[in-house]
Amino acid sequence: MSSGRGAGAAQAQDIAKVSLQRDGDQLVVGLAGTWQISAHLPGTTAVEAALESPPAPTGIEFDSQGIEGWDSSVLTFLMGVEDAADERSIPVDHAGLPDGVRRLVELARAVPERGTRTEEPKGSPLARVGGVGLKIYDGAVGELEFLGEVARAFGAFLRGKARYRKSDLRLLIQQAGADALGIASLVSLLFGLILAFVGAVQLQQFGAAIYVADLVGVGMVRDMAAFMTAIIVAGRSGAAYAAQIGTMRVTEEIDALRTTGISPMEFLVVPRVVALVLMMPLLTVYADLMGILGGYVVGVGILDLTPRAYIQQTINAVNMTHFFPGVIKGTIYGLLVALAGCKQGMAAGNSASAVGDAATRAVVNGVVAIIVACGVAQVISYVFGI
Amino acid sequence: MTETTAASAPPTDQISVRNLTMAYGDFVVMRDLSFDVSPGEVFVIMGGSGCGKSTLMRHLLGMIEPATGEIFYGGESFTSASREVRESYLRRFGVLFQGGALWSSMTLAENIALPLEEYTGLGAAEIRDVASLKLALVGLRGFEDYYPSEISGGMRKRAGLARAMALDPEILFVDEPSAGLDPISSRLLDDLILELRESLGTTFVVVTHELASIFAIASKAIFLDTVTRTATAIGPPIDLRDHSQDPAVRAFLRRGEEEHE
Ligand SMILES: Nc1ncnc2c1ncn2[C@@H]1O[C@H](COP(=O)(O)OP(=O)(O)O)[C@@H](O)[C@H]1O
Ligand SMILES: [Mg+2]
């Protein structure tokens, strides 16, 4: 049986070929032609069929007389044959293979490195549901343990006992705060603009364009400034924290801290959480102003409101019951983003791609946490009428 | 002439491991290890890659809990000691991790200063002097203000050793000193280890599979066998090479000999 692809005569001679013959109770696999990984790779289905066809052979031999050239494609084929033979406990005799091929096959089949990967149990659908449940439970326990450790480290920080570097904290504060101003300005300004346009379309119908000032002012100050800033910070700082800490895990820097008797929670996590919790309120206030500026540009520039009227309307609309909840929300979002980032970093695996995954998860978890917290805040303020 | 350097220091503790089984979850890495490391010894943990050498070192440092068995320092159980007691041991250990594990956001001097700040009452200027001295000992005089990313892998390892030596530890743990180093740097590191043992009386626990290192530094070695998942030989490496009962051990210690002859 030949397994060529109906190619031209000259080429057909060159192509890798497999023939199967019975020699008593042995199956003789004949290899011929030029085996090239870039060309055609014969499958093992025919061999498997021959192993099944009664009377089943009790051994496999090779005849490689016709082979003209080979590379690792022949090994790939042979490993398939070996696996098929192993499944049926049929011994394979390598004597008929070219010397180099034989040595490589034996090398590839040497005792495999034992790994620690435990096979995922496949099991019934019910067992899989249970498995998912257990995973979620483990995740929740891990989350709580992490929070517990952070809380303890924070206690030490508040008592002035935490071990961290003031210069690290200063740098983190600068990165979380000052360095984020540019992007925070842009996004809040545009968001103020967008809010103003969306509002104007509706409000102009009632000749109430001046209320754009209320919409933008209250909307930004109470919710959107904190929300947008938090999303930006999740993408910047949250991801950075996960990547920094995750990399330190890979390079054993965290282990080195531990063996020096320094808690990584105090040394790495606390300064990052403190930096974001300190900077988020400031960024939020800044974003408030930029958002209002965005609304002002639309109100004055496009809706033909007078600057005086717009500013007066904003001052009348926005008060402290909008301002403080907004700032507090921003602070909470900052805490959530920092915790998500540090948690993912500390839980990262031991490879470069694991660090990338950790950064991605930090952003996703951070954003989800922000949105959930925002939703909860809305419900609370509705129920309590704030 | 008597050495005065380490004579005043209290004798370091003997490390004893009894029936230690190490596992990650259900996966048993090594079972039933028992051995002793005497003070001042250079004890080498050898074996093929992935056999559990680093894992054993982490057990000795208390970073991983034994599945079963116990570890003793100076006859006192380390495994069942309280958290505080264990932390007090860290003060007496120095560790050089495989890649050096220098804290990348700090200069070399700051790296060495951190353990000093943590455990000593020295002032900033004194700490700086000690850091410079330690760097000079590993041949890195003048590199105080370099960041780890600005120096080569071999220098990073030496700087890591300087940091591990910061507190003049009684026991220095070293994971794969020659990994990723050229033969000359690796020789220098071996010489440094021997020198420190001579002059400071430091006990060394060294993980390595480099034959040249093993024969150069080890006063005693343990062979972790991947197939049987236990220690198949303990003793001075030359004895093991010539007289070990286990062919795998002899083969490991003789590998490459044919090519050199
Ligand atoms: N954190 C871990 N979780 C699970 N398995 C691990 C972990 N670390 C190492 N292993 C496994 O334990 C075995 C021993 O690893 P290790 O001690 O690092 O070997 P080496 O002798 O090369 O230092 C390896 O099979 C490795 O895959
Ligand atoms: Mg290792």
Image (cartoon, rainbow, N blue to C red):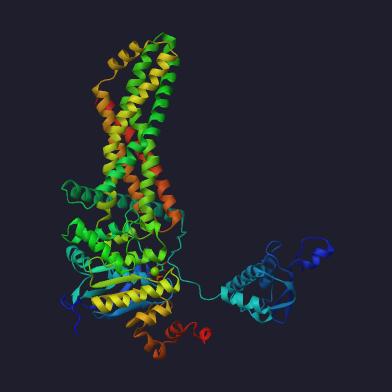
Mark yes or no: residue A319 visible. yes
Q: Quadrant of the C terminus of chain A?
A: top left
Q: Quadrant of the N terminus of chain A?
A: bottom right
Judged left or right of residue A61, residue A386 is left
Mark yes or no: residue B74 visible. no
* Residue at the farthest top position: A207
Q: Quadrant of residue B29?
A: bottom left
Whole-percent x, y for residue B149 in the image: 39, 56
Q: Nearer the viewer, residue A375 or B9?
A: B9
Q: Is residue A216 above or below residue B246?
A: above
* Residue at the farthest right position: A9
Instruction: Residue at 29%, 64% (x, y): give it.
Output: B163
| Number of marks | 0
Q: Quadrant of residue A98?
A: bottom right
Q: Is residue B5 above or below residue B108?
A: below
* Residue at the farthest front position: B142
Q: Nearer the viewer, residue A27 or A304?
A: A304
Whole-percent x, y for residue B246 in the image: 42, 87
Q: Is residue A30 above or below residue A9?
A: below
Whole-percent x, y for residue A37 in the image: 67, 64
Q: Nearer the viewer, residue A366 or A382?
A: A366
Q: Quadrant of residue A174?
A: top left
Q: Is residue B19 above or below residue B250?
A: above
Instruction: Residue at 74%, 74% (x, y): give it.
Output: A67
Whole-percent x, y for residue A19 in the image: 74, 72
Judged left or right of residue A368, residue B14 is left
Q: Quadrant of ligand 2?
A: bottom left
Judged left or right of residue A148, residue B250 is right
